[in-house]
Image (tube, rainbow, N blue to C red):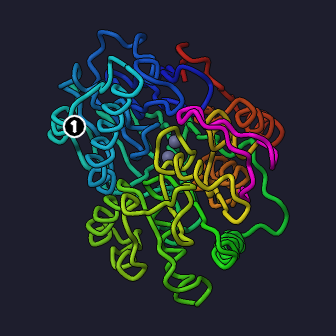
Amino acid sequence: MRIIDLNKTREIGSQCMYLEAGSFKILLDCGMSPREEGYKALPNFSPIDGKAIDIIIISHCHLDHIGSLPFFMKNQQQARILTSPGSHIIMPRILENSVTIMAMQREERGIKEYPLYSVSDIKNLDQHILPMSHAKTRTLQKGGDEINITFFSAGHVIGASSVLIEHKHRTLFFSGDVLFRNQKTLKGAMWPKKKVDVAISETTRGNHGHRKNFSYQSEIDSLVSRIKNTIEGGGSALVPAFALGRMQEILKILHGARAQNKLPKNVPIFCSGLGLGLVDDFDIASKSLRCIDFRSAILRDLKVKSFRNAKFDKLRQPTQPSIFVLSSGMLVENTPSYTTAANLVGDAKNSILFVGYCDPSTPGGELLAQEKHSLFNFKALRLSCKIEANIEHFDLSGHADREDLIEYIFGLNPRTIILTHGEVESRDWFFDSIIDQRPKTVILDPEPGVWYDV
Ligand SMILES: [Zn+2]
Ligand SMILES: [Zn+2]
């Protein structure tokens, strides 16, 4: 097998690797970088120019894994897209939302190449999709060549999958983004008990150890009590959350807390559009996929309102204490969470409570790194605000803890481990830990754009 990393940098960006197994030409994910704009946000497709791709594997529907797919498919009409039924359901909504955002950015920032694809390009994907139920192997043929592909549940978000590829006597396992712990809305990953030759592992949490006595439930309890204290103190709480996954998880947490009287009754809860739209998809998916536990009745019980209906006074404060669960999770510029953070940050009564990964280069990452009482520059709004609100991070990540992940990877007993989807210091932690524990393992932290035989 030959492999090349089409990510442009060793970071979490536009996740995309290309693999050749015999005569099969395979793309592993086709993402778009959240920290770049225009063509720069695409993977570097130039090393595979002129190749007719047979199989595109989509591990899940976060944009860093799927955002470039309709663009890439314009010239790859022969390719088949393998993805899970859960991802198949939510894919159009995620990508259409991305078209809307790109169209907006074209207007606001003059990015001429946006949108990079259209709604009809997204509709065109459907005829190429081969749904892959978890733990069921599919055999694909090409000439006299044959390949076996099996998807496994990866936890993380609805539809997320890890993928086993078997060609002749060679086996490769791709983790995708993975979480082994059960969430409130989704069961944890179910990996095969099997030996593989090569494992490609995400490394998101390599730069993040847990403090002592950490538990998911205790982190949830702290988040809920912080929201309660904020509201009771006359302030509002903003929880920035990825529309896919985190937002539904937070709503389920709020639902449980309210049922146990841990949150004041009648506090309005506002959510942004994509997250609310995805709830309908969750409803459809949860009827056929038993691993998902989220029903739209939760929205009705909580009387969740659309963010468009939220009211602010002349000082840009909410007209009554409110809970905002808004995307983006990293306060990307001009999103509902970004503008709401700008409104709330200057008042000590308010709280901004992060619940997931924040890239250090995004406004969310920058806000978390800054001191209280210092000035924070909301560049897109041309607004500087003194940080007075309570800013906190709660560890409700959708990614596996590094110690868990390395143990599961070792469980596959791979001869070669390829590191991906992590910042440099995260990859370094995995590199060092693997060397320490399994010195005979071949470890690749691939140079982007360089071919490797594996
Ligand atoms: Zn993801
Ligand atoms: Zn990712």
Image quarter of residue 270: bottom left
Q: Could you tell me residue 417's position as x and y percent?
A: 63, 34
Residue 391 placement: quadrant:
bottom right
Residue closer to the observer: 390 or 216: 390
Percent position of residue 353, x then y = 65, 59
Which residue corresponds to the image point at 41% horizontal and 21% vertical from the top-left?
38
In this orientation, does residue 135 appear? no
Q: Is residue 147 left or right of residue 195?
A: left
- What's the residue at 35%, 79% (across, down)? 300
Dot 1 amino acid type: Ile
Residue visible at 51% across and 63% down in the picture:
324
In the depicted view, which residue is nearer to us: 321 or 441? 321
- Please give the name of the residue rendered at 77% of the width and 38% of the height, measured from the top-left corner: 429
- How many numbered markers are drawn? 1
Confirm or reject: label 1 Cβ below 8 Å from ligand 1.
no
Magenta stretch holds residue 375: yes
Q: Secondary structure at mark 1?
A: helix
**Crowding near the residue tagged with mark 1, few <14, some 14–19, many ≥20 C-alpha atoms within 10 Å:** many
State which quadrant residue 77 falls in: top left
Q: Is residue 448 in the magenta section? A: no
In the image, residue 195 above or below residue 229:
above
Q: Residue furthest front?
A: 314
- Residue of label 1: 122
Residue 57's x, y, as percent?
36, 37
Q: Is residue 134 above or below residue 216?
A: above
Relative to residue 260, is residue 438 drawn left or right?
right
Q: Could one spot residue 330 in this view of the protein? A: yes
Give the extent of the magenta segment: 370-392
260, above or below 392, in the image: below
Q: Quadrant of the C terminus?
A: top right
| Farthest-out residue, bottom | 260
Q: Position of residue 142 (x, y in %)?
A: 22, 27
